[in-house]
């Protein structure tokens, strides 16, 4: 059974971000380990977490006018999850199994790519995520800039049925 383990390579040195990534791992592992009859509530918990997780990062991006495709990646992943949830509700678990297999690679790439770039950018401009404000600049200091938008592949929104090819693609 696939699983995720927190390790130092996932740390982006931004405490609230790292905390939400640890929570993602807990929710993912619970869904991955759930018996078939317990999968839907565990998957709902993962979706609920993911919505809050993405809202948190999207809020930081909006606050600092962060450019790039990070938010769109979040939107795509949530769309896939919500589509797959409907299929599970109808008794179709095929794409849910594929998603559970593919999420660890997506998560590690996303955390080390787009999330790392966001954490770096927030630190470089002196953005305090707790107060949602910029720290004052010292004399002569300039704020950093940069999107750091990595080329990441999100799973595509699912289409088709169990007998079709899955459309949730593994991360490149
Ligand atoms: Fe994240
Ligand atoms: Fe993210």
Image: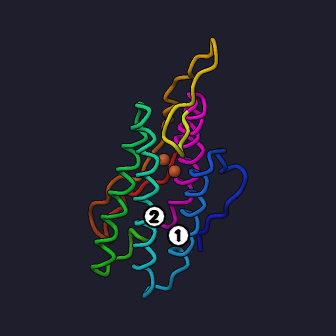
For the residues labelled 1 and 2, say whether their Cβ atoms are less than 8 Å apart: yes
Question: Where does label 2 land, which residue?
Answer: 49
Residue stretch rendered in magenta on the structure: 97-126
Q: Is residue 46 above or below residue 59?
A: below
Residue 32 colored in magenta in the image: no
- Residue 122 image position (x, y, % from top left): 55, 35
- Residue 154 image position (x, y, % from top left): 43, 49
- The label on residue 27 is 1
Q: Secondary structure at mark 2?
A: helix
Identify which residue is drawn at 52% across, 23% down. 145
Which sits earlier in the primary sequence, circle 1 or circle 2? 1
Q: Is residue 116 above or below residue 105?
A: above
Q: Is residue 164 above or below residue 11?
A: below
Which of the pair 13/115 is nearer the observer?
13
Identify which residue is drawn at 52% across, 53% down. 106
Q: Residues within 10 Å of mark 2 (few under 14, many from 20)?
A: some
């Amino acid at each position: 059974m696939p699983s995720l383990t927190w390790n130092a390579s996932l740390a982006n040195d931004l405490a609230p971000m790292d905390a939400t990534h640890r929570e993602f791992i807990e929710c993912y592992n619970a869904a991955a380990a759930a018996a078939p009859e317990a999968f839907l509530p565990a998957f709902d918990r993962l979706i609920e977490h993911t919505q809050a997780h993405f809202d948190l990062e999207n809020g930081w991006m909006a606050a600092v006018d962060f450019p790039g495709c990070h938010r769109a990646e979040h939107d795509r992943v949530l769309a896939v999850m919500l589509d797959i949830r409907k299929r599970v509700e109808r008794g179709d678990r095929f794409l849910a199994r594929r998603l559970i297999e593919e999420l660890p690679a997506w998560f590690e790439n996303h955390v080390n790519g787009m999330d790392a770039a966001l954490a770096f950018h927030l630190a470089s401009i002196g953005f305090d995520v707790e107060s949602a404000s910029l720290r004052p600049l010292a004399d002569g200091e300039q704020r950093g800039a940069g999107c750091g938008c990595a080329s990441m592949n999100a799973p595509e929104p699912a289409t088709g049925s169990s007998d079709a090819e899955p459309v949730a693609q593994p991360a490149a």
